[in-house]
Image (spheres, rainbow, N blue to C red):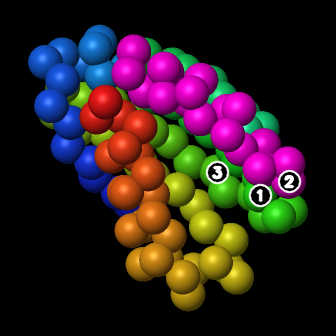
Amino acid sequence: MHIKLPHNLKTEGAAILRAKQALNEMRPQLPKDASIDKEEWSGNTLTFAATANKITITGTLTVTATDYEVQAKLPLMLRMFEGRIEKAIKEQTAKLLNK
């Protein structure tokens, strides 16, 4: 799954900082059965793994001066819901990242 989300921040550095802040704000809101298993930044790219309901999604978030780009690998059982998942991700990240 590939999602490109434009942002209105002026620099890549500001966008990276906002992404890190959003992750910190989101963490306490996770349900009990959800976790962020991997969160590694290398330059402007975050490699992540998250689990919810015993289902793990892995991928990357690449930050540019104009966009957030998410590349995620969905398990086979979730691929039929890719459109709905993409829509939910766009809505939630828009709220978190564009404060």
Residue picked out by circle 1? 52
**Would you call the spot at circle 2 few (<14 residues within 10 Å), some (14-19), or many (20 or more)?**
few
Q: Is residue 70 above or below residue 68?
A: below
- Check disc 2 and give the amino acid type: Asp
Of residue 76 and residue 33, the one placed in the foreground of this image is 33
Q: Earlier in the sequence, mark 1 or mark 3?
A: 1
Q: Write the start and end of the magenta stretch as one range.
A: 17-35
- Check disc 3 and give the amino acid type: Thr
Of residue 86 and residue 38, the one placed in the foreground of this image is 86
Q: Is residue 54 above or below residue 81?
A: above
Residue picked out by circle 2? 33
Residue 41 occupies quadrant:
top right
Secondary structure category for the residue under label 2: loop
Of residue 33 and residue 73, the one placed in the foreground of this image is 33
Mark 2 or 3: in front is 2
Whether residue 69 is visible: no
Q: Earlier in the sequence, mark 2 or mark 3?
A: 2
Q: Is residue 18 magenta?
A: yes
Q: Which part of the image, by quadrant, shows the C terminus? A: top left
Residue picked out by circle 3? 58
Q: Are marks 1 and 2 in contact (CB under 8 Å)?
A: yes
Q: Position of residue 84 (x, y in %)?
A: 46, 77
Mark 1 or 3: in front is 1
Give the distance between the C-alpha atoms of the residues marked 1 and 3, in whole angstroms: 12 Å
User: Is 49 on the left-hand or right-hand side of 92?
Assistant: right
